[in-house]
Amino acid sequence: MTKPADAAERIEALREAIHRHNYLYYAENRPEITDAEYDRLWKELRALEEAHPELITADSPTQSPSGRRQEAFAPVEHLTAMLSLDNAMSPDDLREFEARLRRAAPQAKLDFVCEPKIDGLGVALLYERGRFVRGATRGDGRIGEDVTQNLRTIKTIPATLRGPLENAKRFEVRGEVYMPRGAFAKLNARLEEAGEATFANPRNAAAGAVRQKDPAITATRPLEIFLYHVSILEPPLFDTHWERLHALEKSGFPVNPRSERYPDIEAVVAYGQRLEAERDQLDYEADGAVVKVNDLEQQRRLGATAHHPRWAIAFKFAARQATTTVKAIIINVGKTGALTPAAELEPVELSGVTVSNVSLHNEDEIHRKDVRVGDTVLIERAGDVIPYLVQVITSKRPPGAVSFRMPTHCPACGAPAERPEGEAIWRCTNVACPAQLKERLFHWGSRRAMDIEHLGESVIEQLVDREVVKDFGDLYELDAEQLAGLERLAAKSAKNLADAIQASKQRGLSRVLNGLGIRMVGERAAQLLAARFGNMDRLEQASQEELGEIPGIGPKIAESVHGFFQMDRNRKTIRHLREVGLDLSEQGVSHEPGPLTGKTVVLTGGLRTLSRDQAKDLILRAGGRVSGSVSKKTSYVVAGEDPGSKADDARRLGVALLDEDEFLKLVAGAR
């Protein structure tokens, strides 16, 4: 069994990687790893957390849906979370899914509804008294983007309802916006002819179209939608998912005609295999089939984890493969100095996309697969999305191909590189390395750190390459005039960026700590440290023992934080941030015992007056700890609207249940 200290470090690394890949996939539409590799990361994290439940934190990817929202649109808090789906990679996985259902509901008579899993952009449409009032992207599953006006341009989305749903007081339906394959090919041909950039695949084209700032541009794009899930219906009206699908169709919504109902899992398996065999005949990209329990009461009883419903699963299609050759092995430098190898490939067409690079992850992975320049390799697009190097075809290896060796010096700055004992990653030892600085600045400006809108990769590239910015503090000495001198940054955009940089001075200590990129310190650890010490001065002076005593921190993180503040270059960075006027204190933190000191709180369901993040902040300020799961050690469960299975767990274990008003009274002194 993995030691707790080693597990904590690996868990933090996995969480950081998964959060990054979620952001790249959902917010940036530029994923870097395959579905299969992502699934491996996610399953490894889940297994470690199951083995070490004391290390589970509320901000872990396993405790929330995947995804991230962009910042260009107003945020929308979903009325009920848009969860992810658990995956079945084989028919046996589907059979195990049914076995889990049988164990949870041994007396239930199960039947299933199956539908294609379309690779598009998930959205939620809200109707009030039959009229379309709001459309939002999935975002991070809890907070999405308001794209109402853009969605109104999709002709198949009804503005008013007819049929069985027209008199619903409130009604929310979820679906997938997609671009048909034929329309996608025509769009790309038209863009190419006009000398404009083309789209890599239909999903990117659909996501980009829905996220246009000008709805008139969205209206020119050939978008379609299929609706597949009713999340809110007042009054309820129906008993099964199948009845709801028919009601959607009769009320004017497009419903996938390949949706089918089956009485047992073997029929479901046959459906998935048949759909996979016919996938090239579909006029949309599909990477699997979604399987759902039909009975709505059974769905309610089965409930959901924080990540996925227990009553549904995605049967993923087999990945598609191709062979090509390795032209070179290049090294990329990340924000923590990690040197990550990647194979530069002879471009190859794979499932309609040209693939020219794949990640090789680390030195051990290269040696395990024995990847060499000149090799012929088998690659795949798992889930038809991201390329992944499966294996080397050694029978085709050219004479003289030599084993790869990791560089002993950073390719970006020339400083020595080292591989710490027990780790798989080589790291540059120079924190002033330009490549690291670019990644660190990108993280510093991200939404969950300092939240600096408009501080994108292009701006950061220029600021670092021109040696205008050499550390975080330099950002705050820039003015609009200096920024306007950058390429592709007009005067108004420069002023907006300058204003956003100055506004970020008031984000508070926890955001600063997250933004600094201290090794093993993510958003959750930053919040715990800020809540405990209140300001940077106290934190800098804290001993490693004091740090390790904080619940949720532990010895490895304590060692990393303490070591960070012992380095002169890091203290110099903090001094610079003070000098340019950053608020290095945490608002509302008191060093007196709070009403939740020593208490563990679980949040479930939607709150009327608070976002999930605001509620977490209140708990921390009141001295409490936020957990993602209910146990006998839980002190309170705060239950909002549609609380789900966690409220049931609280009743079963005898844990105190609080409604929103009771919770607010309890933490009143921390507001």
Image (cartoon, rainbow, N blue to C red):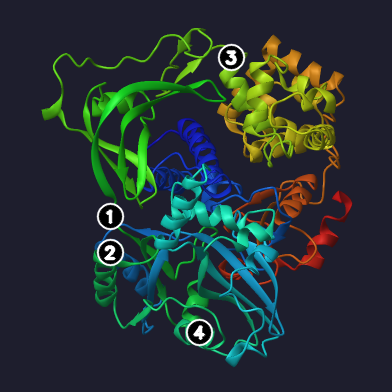
Q: Earlier in the sequence, mark 2 or mark 1?
A: 2
Can you see residue 235?
A: yes
For the residues marked 3 and 1, what is the alpha-carbon distance in whole angstroms? Answer: 41 Å
Quickly name the residue at label 1.
318
Q: Which residue shows up at 42% across the image and 21% down it?
A: 331
Q: Which residue shows up at 50% across the image and 82% down it?
A: 297
For the residues marked 3 and 4, what is the alpha-carbon distance in whole angstroms? Answer: 57 Å
Q: Residue 526 placed where, x, y %? A: 69, 35
Q: Local crowd at mark 1 within 10 Å, few (<14), some, or many (≥20)?
A: some
Quickly name the residue at label 2.
276
Quickly name the residue at label 3.
433
Question: Given contact means CB atoms under 8 Å apart, are the residues at marks 2 and 1 in contact?
Answer: yes
Q: Is residue 498 above or below residue 382?
A: above
Report the amino acid beneath label 2. Glu
Residue 623 vs residue 392, the one in the foreground: 392
Residue 352 vs residue 307, the one in the foreground: 352
Question: Given contact means CB atoms under 8 Å apart, are the residues at marks 4 and 2 in contact?
Answer: no
Q: Earlier in the sequence, mark 3 or mark 1?
A: 1
Quickly name the residue at label 4.
249
SS at mark 4 in the image: helix
Report the amino acid beneath label 4. Glu
For the residues marked 1 and 4, what is the alpha-carbon distance in whole angstroms? Answer: 31 Å
Snapshot quadrant of residue 124:
bottom right
For the residues marked 3 and 2, what is the alpha-carbon distance in whole angstroms? Answer: 47 Å
